[in-house]
Image (cartoon, grey):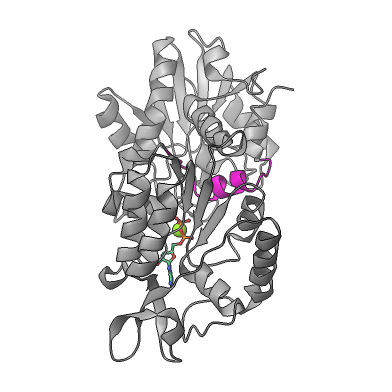
């Protein structure tokens, strides 16, 4: 049995639909830098419109202070871009939702940022009552915000006459579940990024599922340090050394391979160079994996049945340190495995260095993606589960 209440199984003909999307696009100086998140919401919006239903769309945008309007975080630019993409009019409602409930007079309305509202983050019930007023069905589609127990991602479901999951969130869940249920083996996970602490739980969880874990970036540095290697002045987390050792021990016991880099790109006061790991000196800062290590990882990818990628393996934003992440990105794209990637910086790297469309599934979630992999119950997914 399908455990989820899905939009496509719900009668929405001619109804008023309250839709939570994740329209939290990257922006700079009031301009949208990347509109992928708006585009990801379009199939659900079009589906609703095809049923002659009216839709009020709500989302958060950035991290403004609650209770205060801030132009920098206004969803107006998102509503405008959505109108361009849909090629039809989108009404932007600037009156905050706690002052005016959605009225469903227009076909498509985008409401102002839910994070301007007092009570959004605490999941306030009075606020939820106001927002849910006049709606027939609440459609939760914001996978990227589903790990938040906020008013707009959770509490609303207690006040809307019915709740279901939109096309995007269902697609996310189905693809991510493939990793847990019958993944094609061997399964490889690449977990990079700056901090072990943000990814410790996911690393532990993955030990139960994968055959190989490749750690990268500051995370790899912490593992190298814990294994007794000199890492000079590289970024690592002292408080995570014991945890890293524990992970290595569990990996050994479970026969999960945890390869570490053989060569790295490092920087010191004089130069940037590729060095064998064993030659690292006190003043060196490791900022990327070296070419030998890239080749070693590429071989692992060639044999893979499933590859999961989250987190760059180097400081890919800077040219001298981009090659490792570039190599990983193109090797994953070329692989015949079922490939899945997620995380803000991971997606930027894929867009920058590879043909992102050759990844089998790219998750729109960052934090939510990681928490899903940790096996956590996400509040925004809980509300679309059948009882
Ligand atoms: P994602 O957003 O995909 O989950 P993270 O935010 O966890 O990824 O990690 C990305 C960041 O990690 C990047 O800003 C990158 O510069 C940094 N990083 C990667 N390798 C290193 C390194 N060796 N030293 C310092 N920072 C690193
Ligand atoms: Mg990031």
Residue located at (55% from left, 52% from top): 66
Task: Please tell me which residue lies in front, 114 or 241.
Answer: 241
Classify residue 290 as left or right of residue 245: left
The picture quadrant where one finds residue 183 is top right
Q: Residue 315, percent across and down? A: 37, 68
Q: Please determine whether, in this image, residue 29 is positioned above or below residue 139.
A: below
Q: Quadrant of ligand 2?
A: bottom left
Question: What span is in magenta?
Answer: 361-377
Residue located at (35% from left, 71% from top): 290
Residue located at (32% from left, 70% from top): 321
Task: Please tell me which residue lies in front, 363 or 27.
Answer: 363
Q: Residue 189, percent across and down? A: 52, 52
Q: Quadrant of the C terminus?
A: top right
In the rendered image, residue 17 lying in the magenta stretch gets the answer: no
Q: Residue 152, percent across and down? A: 58, 37
Q: Residue 258, percent across and down? A: 56, 62
Task: Please tell me which residue lies in front, 36 or 95.
Answer: 36
């Amino acid at each position: 049995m399908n455990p989820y209440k899905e939009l496509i199984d719900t009668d929405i003909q001619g109804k008023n639909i309250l839709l939570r999307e994740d329209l939290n696009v990257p922006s700079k100086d009031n301009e949208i830098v990347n509109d992928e998140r708006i585009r990801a919401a379009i199939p659900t919006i079009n589906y609703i419109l095809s049923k002659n239903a009216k839709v009020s769309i709500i989302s958060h945008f950035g991290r403004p202070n609650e209770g205060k309007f801030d132009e920098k975080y206004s969803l107006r630019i998102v509503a405008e871009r959505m109108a361009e993409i849909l090629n039809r009019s989108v009404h932007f409602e600037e009156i905050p939702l706690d002052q005016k409930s959605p009225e469903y007079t227009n076909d498509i309305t985008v409401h102002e940022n839910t994070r301007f509202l007092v009570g959004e983050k605490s999941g306030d019930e009075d606020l939820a009552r106001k927002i849910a007023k006049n709606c027939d069905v609440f459609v939760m589609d914001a996978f990227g915000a589903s790990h938040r127990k906020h008013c707009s991602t959770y509490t609303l479901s207690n006040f809307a006459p019915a709740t279901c999951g939109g096309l995007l969130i269902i697609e996310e869940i189905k693809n991510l579940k493939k990793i847990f249920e019958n993944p094609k083996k061997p399964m490889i996970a690449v977990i990079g990024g700056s901090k072990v602490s943000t990814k410790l739980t996911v690393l532990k969880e993955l030990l139960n599922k994968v055959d190989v874990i490749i750690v990268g970036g500051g995370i790899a540095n912490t593992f190298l340090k814990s294994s007794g290697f000199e890492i000079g002045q590289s970024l690592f987390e002292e408080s995570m050394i014991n945890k890293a050792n524990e992970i290595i021990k569990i990996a050994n016991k479970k026969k999960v391979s945890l390869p570490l880099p053989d060569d790295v790109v490092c920087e010191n006061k004089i130069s940037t160079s590729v060095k064998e790991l064993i030659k690292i000196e006190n003043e060196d800062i490791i900022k990327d994996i070296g070419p030998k290590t890239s080749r070693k990882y590429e071989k692992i990818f060639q044999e893979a049945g499933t590859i999961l990628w989250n987190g760059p393996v180097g400081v890919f934003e800077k040219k001298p340190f981009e090659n490792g992440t570039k190599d990983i990105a193109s090797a994953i794209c070329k692989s015949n495995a079922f490939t899945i990637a997620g995380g803000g910086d991971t997606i930027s790297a894929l867009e920058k260095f590879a043909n992102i469309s050759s990844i089998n599934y790219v998750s729109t979630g960052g934090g939510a993606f990681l928490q899903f992999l940790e096996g956590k119950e996400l509040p925004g997914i809980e509300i679309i589960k059948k009882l």
